[in-house]
Image (spheres, rainbow, N blue to C red):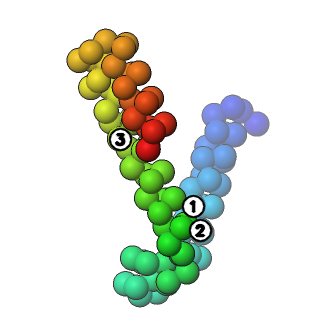
Amino acid sequence: MSLQLTTYIIVGLTFLLYIGIAIWSRARSTKDYYIAGGNVGPITNGMATAADWMSAASFISMAGMVANMGFGGSVFLMGWTGGY
């Protein structure tokens, strides 16, 4: 089997897996979609929100801070994210 065929098979199986997960875990209503059916507690929701904010803020801000302030600008981001 060639490398190209093996690659196509792996990518195809991965897509099929993703499609299967999407169909299996489909939200049945708007409530299920927006609040996960009420199954997510406040601590878990807070941790997810904090992780999302830190991830987005760090990656989006890092390019601008480093471009504007040089490599020293990344020190602000590390302190900001670590202090959150």
Image depth: mark 3 or mark 2 in front: 3
Can you see residue 30? yes
Classify residue 4 by image quadrant: top right
* Three-letter code, disc 1: Tyr
| Residue tagged 1 | 18
**Screen quadrant of the N terminus:** top right
Disc 1 and disc 3 in contact, CB within 8 angstroms: no
Work out whether mark 3 precedes mark 2 in sequence or the reverse, and give the earlier one.
2
- The circle on residue 21 is 2
| Residue tagged 3 | 57
**Residue 7 picture location, percent across and down:** 64, 39
**Label 3 – label 2 distance at C-alpha:** 29 Å
| Residue in the image at 47% along x and 63% along y | 46
**Residue 49 picture location, percent across and down:** 43, 58
Identify the element where label 1 is drawn.
helix
Work out whether mark 1 precedes mark 3 in sequence or the reverse, and give the earlier one.
1
* Three-letter code, disc 2: Ile
